[in-house]
Image (cartoon, coloured by chain):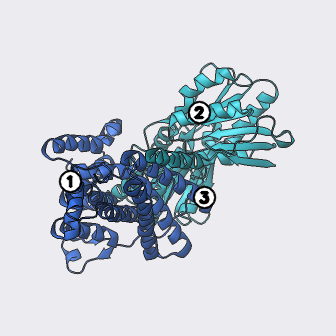
Chain colours: A blue, B cyan
C-alpha cells in the first residue's frame, strides 16, 4: 500500500481521475440544465456515441482536431433538435423516447463506423496544454494544469452553468418550468421554448462529451461509451441537480476508477479480487444515490410533458 | 469465391429505436433466402460478441472463415453484446438453412445447448470451449493462447530495461487468462523481474484500458501487452509513450506500426477445415479442437518495422520450435 502513497503515483492517479471524469462532467452538466427544466434525457449515451463517431471521422478525414470538436457539438445540437421536437412539441413520454434516442445513436454510430471506417484506426489525440505558471506548481501542476482544452472547458463550465441557472433570467425560467410549469406559463414564460432551449444546451454538451471521450482516446470502436451516458444521468441525481455537486460526483467516480486501476497495477488489489474491485464505482454511486435521495428532491415537473390547462 | 452477407444489428436497433420513439409519441434484415448457397456454396454463419473488424477476437474468426479453401457463403451477426440476442441469431441462422453456425463466444454455450438438439442436420461450432457438452452436432474449439503468450513474454523480457512489464486484460476468463498466464511465465523465465496484470473488468471499455496502461507506465513499466477488443485504447497510450506493444488474437500492427513488436494471430481455419472435412464425411460434431503453434492455428506474426535486438528473433523462433516439439513447457 505504501507504494501508492508516493507523490508520483498520487499525481498520476489524480490526472487519471480527471481524464476519466471529463466526459462524465460535460454530459452531466448538460443533463443538469435539461432536468432542471423538467426534461429527462436517457438518450445521453446515444448522443455521445454519435458525436464521438462523427468527431473521430472528422479527424480521420481532415486531421483537424478543432473541427472535430465543433462537429461533435453540432451533432449534439442536431440530436437535441430531434429530442426537443419529440418530447416538447410531440409531448412523448420522456423515458421511452430517451431510450429510443440511445438505441438510435448506438445503432447509427455502429453502422456508420462499419460503412465509413471498418477496422479501428488511431487518430491524433487532443494535446495537453500547460497553463502558464500554474503548470509549474510542483506535482499539483502536472495533475491539474497540464490537461487538454476540453478538460479545462468542462471545469470552467461548472461555475458558468451554476451562474446560468441561478443568476440569469433564463436560468430562473429554466428552474420555474422545471418546478411549476403552469405557474411559469401564467407569468408569461414560454414553457415549450424554455425547455426546448434547455434540451439544445444539454444535448450540445453531451455532444461535446462524446468528442472529448474520443479525442482523449484517439480511437473509436462500436459502443465506445460503454454506458457512460447513463452514469452521467445518475450523476445529476448524485449531484442533487447542482453543477458543483455534479462535478463532485464526476470527480469521485473518476477517482474511484483511477484508484482501483492503480491499485491493480501495483498489485495492491490481487488479481483474484479484481472482479470485486471492479464493482466499487457502481456500488459507490448506488450508495450515494440512496443518501442523496433522502435529502433532496428532483425538480417537481421532471419527466412531465407540459399541457396548458 | 466467398459471398458475404451481413445481418447488421445496427439496422435492427435503429428501426427498433424509431418504433420506440413512435410508441412514445402515440427488424429488418438481409438474411439470404433459405436453401443451399449460390452455386452449391457452403452456407456458414458467424454470431460474435464484438465487431467483425475489431482487430481482436471476432475479426480472427471472420478472417479465418474467409481463408477457408472452399466456396463459402458467409453471414455475420456481430456486436451481440447480449447473450439472448446472440441466441436468437443462432436459432435464426439454423432455421434459415445454414449448413454451419459458428457461435463465437464462450458465453453462448448455454444457449447453444438448447438450440443444437432442435437442428440435428446443422453443424454448430462453438468456442472458445474445450468440450462439446456431449452433443453430436457441436464441434468445440479453443486456442492454446498460453503458447503465443509465452513467446511474446519472452521477447518482452528481452526488450525491457526496467524489468517491469505491464498487462491489460479484460475479465479473468477464457483465452485471456491463458494468454496472460503464458505471457507472464515467458516474461519471468526470460528474466523480467515483475509482470503486473490489470483486469479492467470489461471487454469493451476502451477508456478504462487506456487508463490501465497509463497506470502501468507510471509504475516503471516499459513494455506492454493486452488482450480483447478494448486494448485499442491501451495501444494508443503505448504508442504515445513510445513503449513496445505485443498483440494477440489478431495482428495489431496497424494500431501502432512502429511499436507493435509481434502478434499472436489465431488461424481458426486450421481446425475449421478439419471440422468441415468431418462434416463432409457425415460426422456433424462431437469433437473438440485446439489451435496451437504445432498445428499452425497459432502463428506469431512479427512486425518487421520493429527492429529487435540481435539474437532476440532467433531466440523467439527457437522457443516456438521448442513449444512445438514439446521441449519447452509454458507452465499452463
Q: Is residue A140 above or below residue B296?
A: below
Of residues A276 and B176, which is closer to you in this image? A276
Chain letter of disc 1 in the image: A
Expressed as whole percent of the image width and height from the top left, the position of residue A55 reads 47, 67
Q: CA distance from mark 2 to mark 3?
A: 25 Å
Alpha carbon of mark 3 to alpha carbon of mark 1: how far? 46 Å
Name the residue carrying label 1.
A179
Residue A14's spot in the image, x, y percent? 24, 60
Q: Chain of mark 3?
A: A
Query: What SS does tag 1 mark?
Result: helix
Residue A13 spot, x, y in % from top left: 26, 57
Q: Secondary structure at mark 3?
A: loop
Q: Depth check: B284 or A10 in front?
A: B284
For the residues labelled 1 and 2, the Cα–Cα distance comes to 45 Å
Which residue of the protein is positioned furthest toward the bottom in this rendering?
A132
Residue A53's disc is: none
Q: Are marks 1 and 2 on the same chain?
A: no
Query: Taking B300 as reference, is B218 above or below it?
Result: below
Look at the picture and state if A235 lies above or below B237.
above
For mark 3, what is the residue?
A118
Q: Position of residue A72 (x, y in %)?
A: 44, 67
Q: For mark 2, what is the residue?
A: B88
The one nearer the camera, A16 or B319, is A16
Amino acid at each position: 500500500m505504501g507504494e501508492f502513497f508516493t507523490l508520483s503515483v498520487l499525481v498520476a492517479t489524480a490526472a487519471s481521475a480527471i481524464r476519466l471524469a471529463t466526459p462524465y462532467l460535460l454530459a452531466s452538466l448538460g443533463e443538469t440544465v435539461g432536468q432542471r427544466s423538467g426534461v429527462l434525457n436517457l438518450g445521453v449515451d446515444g448522443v455521445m456515441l454519435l458525436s464521438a463517431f462523427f468527431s473521430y471521422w472528422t479527424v480521420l478525414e481532415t486531421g483537424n482536431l478543432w473541427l472535430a470538436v465543433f462537429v461533435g457539438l453540432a451533432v449534439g445540437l442536431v440530436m437535441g433538435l430531434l429530442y426537443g421536437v419529440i418530447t416538447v412539441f410531440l409531448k412523448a413520454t420522456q423515458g421511452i423516447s430517451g431510450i429510443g434516442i440511445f438505441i438510435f445513436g448506438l445503432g447509427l454510430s455502429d453502422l456508420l463506423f462499419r460503412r465509413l471506417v471498418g477496422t479501428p484506426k488511431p487518430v491524433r489525440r487532443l494535446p495537453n496544454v500547460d497553463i502558464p505558471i500554474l503548470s509549474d506548481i510542483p506535482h499539483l501542476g502536472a495533475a491539474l494544469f497540464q490537461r487538454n482544452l476540453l478538460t479545462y472547458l468542462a471545469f470552467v463550465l461548472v461555475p458558468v452553468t451554476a451562474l446560468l441557472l441561478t443568476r440569469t433570467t433564463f436560468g430562473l425560467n429554466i428552474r420555474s418550468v422545471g418546478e411549476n410549469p403552469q405557474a411559469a406559463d401564467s407569468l408569461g414564460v414560454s414553457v415549450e421554448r424554455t425547455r426546448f432551449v434547455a434540451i439544445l444546451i444539454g444535448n450540445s454538451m453531451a455532444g461535446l462529451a462524446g468528442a472529448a471521450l474520443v479525442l482523449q482516446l484517439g480511437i473509436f470502436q462500436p459502443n465506445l461509451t460503454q454506458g457512460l451516458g447513463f452514469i452521467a444521468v445518475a450523476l445529476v441525481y448524485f449531484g442533487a441537480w447542482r453543477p458543483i455537486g455534479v462535478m463532485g460526483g464526476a470527480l469521485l467516480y473518476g477517482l474511484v476508477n483511477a484508484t482501483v486501476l492503480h491499485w491493480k497495477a501495483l498489485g495492491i488489489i490481487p488479481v483474484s479480487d479484481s472482479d470485486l474491485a471492479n464493482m466499487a464505482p457502481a456500488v459507490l454511486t448506488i450508495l450515494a444515490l440512496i443518501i442523496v435521495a433522502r435529502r433532496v428532491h428532483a425538480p417537481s415537473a421532471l419527466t412531465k410533458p407540459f399541457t396548458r390547462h | 469465391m466467398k459471398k458475404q452477407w451481413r445481418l447488421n444489428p445496427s439496422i435492427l436497433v435503429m428501426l427498433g429505436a424509431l418504433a420506440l420513439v413512435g410508441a412514445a409519441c402515440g427488424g429488418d434484415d438481409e438474411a439470404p433466402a433459405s436453401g443451399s448457397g449460390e452455386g452449391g456454396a457452403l452456407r456458414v454463419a458467424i454470431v460474435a460478441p464484438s465487431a467483425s473488424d475489431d482487430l481482436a477476437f471476432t475479426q480472427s474468426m471472420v478472417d479465418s472463415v474467409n481463408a477457408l479453401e472452399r466456396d463459402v457463403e458467409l453471414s455475420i451477426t456481430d456486436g451481440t453484446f447480449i447473450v439472448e440476442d446472440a441466441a436468437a441469431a443462432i436459432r435464426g441462422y439454423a432455421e434459415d438453412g445454414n449448413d454451419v453456425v459458428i457461435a463465437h463466444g464462450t458465453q453462448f454455450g448455454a444457449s447453444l445447448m438448447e438450440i443444437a438438439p432442435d437442428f440435428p442436420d446443422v453443424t454448430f461450432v462453438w468456442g472458445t470451449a474445450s468440450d462439446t457438452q456431449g452433443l453430436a452436432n457441436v464441434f468445440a474449439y479453443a486456442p492454446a493462447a498460453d503458447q503465443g503468450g509465452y513467446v511474446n513474454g519472452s521477447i518482452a523480457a528481452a526488450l525491457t530495461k526496467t524489468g517491469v512489464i505491464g498487462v491489460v486484460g479484460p475479465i479473468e476468463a477464457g483465452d485471456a487468462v491463458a494468454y496472460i498466464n503464458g505471457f507472464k511465465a515467458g516474461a519471468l523465465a526470460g528474466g523480467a523481474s515483475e509482470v503486473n496484470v490489470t483486469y479492467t473488468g470489461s471487454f469493451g471499455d476502451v477508456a478504462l484500458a487506456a487508463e490501465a496502461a497509463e497506470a502501468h507506465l507510471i509504475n516503471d513499466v516499459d513494455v506492454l501487452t493486452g488482450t480483447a477488443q478494448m486494448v485499442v485504447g491501451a495501444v494508443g497510450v503505448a504508442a504515445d509513450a513510445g513503449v513496445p506493444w505485443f498483440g494477440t488474437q489478431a495482428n495489431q500492427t496497424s494500431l501502432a506500426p512502429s511499436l507493435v513488436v509481434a502478434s499472436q494471430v489465431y488461424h481458426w481455419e486450421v481446425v475449421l477445415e478439419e471440422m468441415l472435412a468431418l462434416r463432409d464425411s457425415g460426422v456433424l460434431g462431437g469433437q473438440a479442437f485446439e489451435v496451437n503453434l504445432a498445428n499452425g492455428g497459432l502463428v506469431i506474426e512479427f512486425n518487421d518495422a520493429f527492429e529487435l535486438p540481435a539474437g532476440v528473433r532467433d531466440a523467439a523462433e527457437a522457443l516456438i520450435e521448442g513449444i512445438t516439439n514439446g521441449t519447452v513447457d509454458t507452465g499452463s
